Image (spheres, helix red, strand yellow):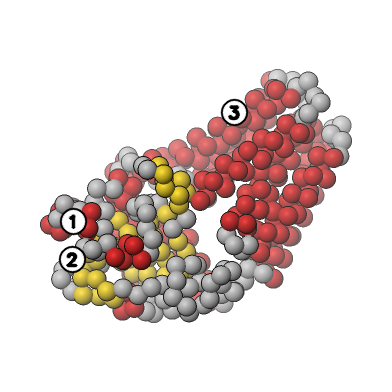
Amino acid sequence: MNTWTWGPLVLHYNMLLIMGAIAAGYGVLHLRLLRRSDRGIVTSIAVNALLVWVLVWKLSLLLLDFRAVLENPMSLLYFNGGRRGVWLAWLLSAGYAAIAAEKRKIGRSVYIDSLAVSVLGGYAIFHALHFIMSGFQPVTSGIIGSLGAAAAIVWLRSPLPETHRASVQRLLVIAIGWVLVITVANGLFDKPGGPPAAGTAEGVPGLGVGQQAPDFELKLLNGETIRLSDYRGQTVFVNFWATWCPPCQAEMPYMQQFYSDYARDGVVILGVNATHTEASVPVVAAWVKEWKITFPIALDTTGDVTDTYRVNAYPATYVVDPGGVIREKHPGPMNGDMLMSAWEKITNKSEK
């Protein structure tokens, strides 16, 4: 899975990208305001706006899924408001930055221009790092990273606009160009069902996205023996979990709800329990009963399947399409929005 583990610390791949993007954005902001006396004030506003963004994004789950948080407060530790939370975070953090800049008597042209190029630089670096660390795939990320970096460099070399209207006009031109580039790149290079990632081959067994998921045979909690290939023709979420794992406990209600809602549409959740780490099988059965789980629970008593799928932290989920091909790998817990997003990607592929 896309994680790095040092003792008890598990660092997700996406977190590395976000950290790199934040560092890049901060550096771009400093460069843009290099010779200005108000650089410290603008930088302080930017840092506070970032904190507002993170807090709103994280706590938006309270507003968007209050019932889930009420039933399981641990959800706040592992989940956020998803895409809607992101938009809410952008709205409130931008509002904070505007109000703070007005109070500090900073010209609108300065903070609009400097914060915009900072976001552009960070976003470009995020996609550039994703492109490099993913084996130079997908092509869209490479294009966004390259053009975004070039646009940020040109922006940094240009003088600060004298009016906020000029800043807004420049921002609109960049935004429109950005949308056009992403739309064209998605249509030409990253079409659904397109070529697999570099170093992989469609239909060849492996753990890469676009490769055939390794088959395995395990006994279910009810004593029945199953193979992963038995579910060919259905979308399978192979979820590795354990009863002692707090994030696993947080995601189980979402897994069960998603299965209940979409099992009739060909969705299967196959829970692979790390039985080799459990106190006993009856303990697993007791938890399954308490959570009222109805999807199949397979018992990995030897840990061989866990090793085959290189799971080094729980929970972890592989999303396998009806043809048995891995379409997504997700380290960490998944909520309803994440599960739906993964399934929609596969559904869209099959409809193209």
Mark pair 1, 3: CA separation: 45 Å
Outermost left residue: 282
Which residue: 72% across, 37% down?
28
Q: Callout 3: 10 Å neighbours few (<14), some, many (20+)?
A: some
> Left or right: where does residue 24 sit relative to residue 1?
right
Mark pair 2, 1: CA separation: 9 Å
Q: For residue 48, which numbered disc appears in the image? A: 3
**Chain-order first, disc 1 or disc 3:** 3
Nearer-the-camera pick, 138 or 5: 5
> Left or right: where does residue 320 sit relative to residue 151?
left
Q: Amino acid at mark 3?
A: Asn
Q: Are marks 2 and 1 in contact (CB under 8 Å)?
A: yes
Q: Are marks 1 and 3 in contact (CB under 8 Å)?
A: no
Label 2: which residue? 221
Rendered image quadrant of residue 280: bottom left
Q: Is residue 54 above or below residue 124?
A: above
Label 1: which residue? 284
Q: Quadrant of the N terminus?
A: bottom left
Rendered image quadrant of residue 214: bottom left
Outermost front residue: 7
Which residue: 74% across, 60% down?
180
Q: Callout 2: 10 Å neighbours few (<14), some, many (20+)?
A: some
Which residue: 72% across, 34% down?
29
Which residue: 47% across, 78% down?
204
